[in-house]
Structures are given as C-alpha cells and as structure tokens.
Image (spheres, rainbow, N blue to C red):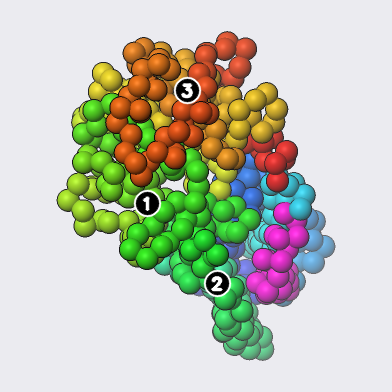
Amino acid sequence: MEDVSNSNVKTRGISLLRAYTISFVGGFGILLLEILGFRLFAPFYGNSVYISGSMITMVLTALSVGYVVGGILADKYTSYRALLIILYISAGYLVVIGFTHYPIMEYFLRFGAIWGAICSSFTLFFIPMMLMSMISPYLIKILANTQNVGKISGSIFAVSTVGSIAGSLLTTFYFIPRFGSHTTLIGCIGFLFVAFGACTTRKYKFLILLGLIVIPMHLKKTAKNPDLIFEKESPYNLVMVFNVPEGRAMVLNSGALQGMAFNNALGGSTSVFRYIGSFSVIPLLTDTRDILVLGTGAGMSVNNFLNHYDAMVDAVEIDPLVVDVARDYFNMDTTNPRLKIYVEDAKNFVRRIHKKYDIVEIDVYHGGFYIPFYLATKEFFQEIKAILQPNGIMVMNVIGVLGDGKRSLLVNAIGNTISSVYPKTYAIQSGGNTVIVAASEKYDVEYIKNRILQNMPVELSSVANNFLTNLVEMKFDKNRPLLTDDKSNLEELTFRFLSQTL
C-alpha cells in the first residue's frame, strides 16, 4: 500500500507537499476574503447581523457549489493542470475585482443595506471562493486510490482548515489593522498568483511574475477628495476628516454612513449637532462631580463638560484612532487633569468599574446608524443604574424622532426599554436625533425646570431653553418593544428606520 505520509511521494504527477501547499493556500484565501468582506462592506452597508448573515450565506453557498462542481469536474478532467487552470481563473477574477470593488459596492447601495450586501458579496466573492473550494475534491481525486481515500481526504481537509485558521487570524489581527482593507485585498491577489505559480511546472513559472506585477498596479494612488485632510484605518473603523463649510467633519467608515460632523473653530471646537447641546444641560440637574462618557466621538461632549463644569470626566472609546483624531483635529483636551480616557469596550468598562457617577452619557453609534445591540438592552441600562449615584442621571443619544411612524421606531424601542428600568424617563427631540434622559423619582418636570433656571449659565441659555421647550415624559408601555440581552430586534428596527429615512 502507498505510504501517503511521505511528502515526497508523487501520485499522478503531483507530490503530496505540493498538494498540501495548494490546499493550505486555498483555505487561507477563502477565509481571508470572508473576513475582508465584512470590513469592505462596513462603510457601505453597516455592521449589523443582517450583513454578517448575508456574507456567511454567500460563503457557504460558494463552498457547497464548489464542492459539488469540483467533484464533477475532477471525475471528468482528472489532471493537475486542470486544477491550476481553475485556480488561475479565480486569481484572475480577483484582479478585476481589485479595480472595481468600490464602484460595485456603491452601485448596489441603491438596493438598501441588506440586498446591497447580498448582491455585492455574490458579485465580488462568490466566483473566486467557489473556484478555490474545488481544490479539496480535485486533490482527493488526483491523489487517492481505493486503499487510501479516507486518509488522503482527511489530510487534505485538515490542511485546508489549518490554512483557513491562519487566514482568519492573520487577516483579523495583522493584515487589516496594519495595512488596511484595500491593501490586504491586493496582497491576497498577489499572494495567490505567487503561491499557485510556485506550485506549477517550470513552463508556467512566469505567473509568479504576473502576481508581483498585479500588486503595484492596484496600489497606484487614486484621486482623493480635495476636502479630505486625514484618512486612516484602524481595527474598528476607517476614520476620515474632511474640511466642510462649518469647519471639520469626522466620518467613520464612509460618507454613506456619516458618523459625526463638528465645527472646528479657532481655539476650540463646537458641535453642529443639536443633541450635543442637550447633553451640556444635564449637569445643571444635579450636583455634578463625576461624569462618564461612553463613546467620545470627536470629543465635543467631553470638551463641553470640561469647559462648562468643574467635574471629573471619564471617557470610554473602543477605537484608539478615534481618540487620536479627536485630539489632533477637534481639540479634545487629552492633557486636562480632569479628563481620563479609557480605550476599551463600553460594556466591559461598565461591568468592571466600581466608581459611582453623577451622570452617564451614552453615544455609541459605531460609524453609522447602528448601535451595538448589547449597549441598548434592559440589562445594560440596569448595569448603568448600578454605577450611578442615588440622584444620578443617564442620558443617551438615539437617532430618530418622537412619534409613532418608522422614523420613531428606535426612539420608542430604546425609550421604552429605559423606562422599564428608571422611574423617570424623558425625551428631548433635537433635530433628527432624540436625547433620552433617565433618572430617579424626584426628577419630575417641575423639579427639572427649577434646577435649570436656577443654575443656567448665560452661555447655555439657548440650549437650556430648547431643552425645556422640547421635554416630553416617556412611560413604559408593555405593547412596545422591550430590548433584552436574550431578545433584541434593534438591528431590524434600525433597518426599517433606514428604509424609511434614507
């Protein structure tokens, strides 16, 4: 019986070492493209579970089709050369995608987030993933005989899986954070050409050179928006800063999903978002010594608290690059002794901190219109309540307006969930956003009004009057959604909201 453990053994013209190399590269490429797909889609379609589900569905479909078609072709054309042709078609398709993936995603954006993501994933990645998934059945057919088919099959799938593990880890923790998504895609294309070329016969070694040529072709700088003054990719976001008529704007991921826009005046920064002004009023309602800000963004709210109140501010932001940009382009005073910044996930911070706060501000949209669902559940609001002083106040920014239509879906769901935890809940509509305020029983409308009028500084008079004018109490309604860790349809509500407003 043939000893398949020896990598130098050749079966039907291919050594096991070469077969294992191709299997590893195929598994590596498939997972690299899958992880990369999530990142490429985020600026256009968001980060919701619908986008993840669409991408995973495409991957599984491609693998299934590839296994079946690969098996059929392997029976009909049992040759190593036929397999290499398939693999180079896959790499060649990706060459085209390297030039066209941004226009393709922009085109499909017109169909909405879900259908846009589905169409883009199938257009960009279905064919190369399907072709690479043919590797395993093809190699098994070429290598196996009736005596060792089980061992060969297990070995090929094991090596492919190891390649997938390597592709997943390297793409997630090294390639994207260090080089960015576009460069990672181009590097993948070049890598496939070089790797497959190394496994071919001498006659076709020139394909290695083709792979080396592909990389600089795609990395050629394209024309930039003349108003773009900063652009860099982090493990969490593509962070951009633009000059705009009002001053400067921070955009997370893409202009299609604008994160924040702020006015950057000489000597300081002032938000052009009205809801930031409502945040500034909250410290007037209580004796404020300690404030927690979850989600710093460009640092406008942090600056307002530091400039208008003699309070300690703890600010939590998951993306270190956002903190750097807020400091360098929007004058967030990171050297202020009253400010302490924590770079970590808001949920983890709230769970581990033992400090009590007078105010907790929540503004945690991650580069678009989606809030991580676990930061808008009954359990999370209970955890916030646990770190508040007895007279402490929680305040949260929610995109949407008051009412009963689709534009109010998020406000009603999140407001209702907050109302299930706090005795008093209020909403203040500020343009296209709504600020939800939650506090203890003592904070009735009359008490709030008196506190603001007694403590209102002149510079906050306009936003304070707007706060009082638009103050509306919210009551818990069992007929409205209640968002929990176990069951939350926040992403569905967000999608329905976006389908109505965008």
Image point 36% across, 32% down: which residue?
A: 282
Q: Which mark is residue 227?
A: 2
Work out whether mark 1 precedes mark 2 in sequence or the reverse, and give the earlier one. Answer: 2
Q: Which mark is residue 299?
A: 1
Give the residues drawn in magenta, as a range.
84-109
Image point 19% across, 47% down: which residue?
A: 338
Look at the magenta stretch and give its main secondary structure.
helix
- In the rendered view, does 205 fall on the left or right side of 463? right
Q: Secondary structure at mark 1?
A: loop
Q: Which quadrant of the figure contains the N terminus? A: bottom right
Image point 46% across, 67% down: which residue?
A: 232
Residue 249 seen in the current view:
yes
The answer to the question of whether label 2 and label 3 lie on touching residues, with beta carbons closer than 8 A, is no
Q: Is residue 489 above or below residue 497?
A: above
Q: Which residue is mark 3?
A: 426
Q: Amino acid at mark 2?
A: Asp
Work out whether mark 2 precedes mark 3 in sequence or the reverse, and give the earlier one. Answer: 2
Q: Secondary structure at mark 3?
A: strand
Q: Amino acid at mark 3?
A: Tyr
Q: Residues within 10 Å of mark 3 (few under 14, many from 20)?
A: many
| Label 1 – label 3 distance at C-alpha | 24 Å
- In the rendered view, does 435 fall on the left or right side of 76? left
Q: Amino acid at mark 1?
A: Gly
Q: Residue furthest left?
A: 337
Q: Residues within 10 Å of mark 1 (few under 14, many from 20)?
A: many
Q: Give residue 355's position: percent from left, percent from top.
A: 21, 31
Q: Is residue 39 above or below residue 296?
A: below
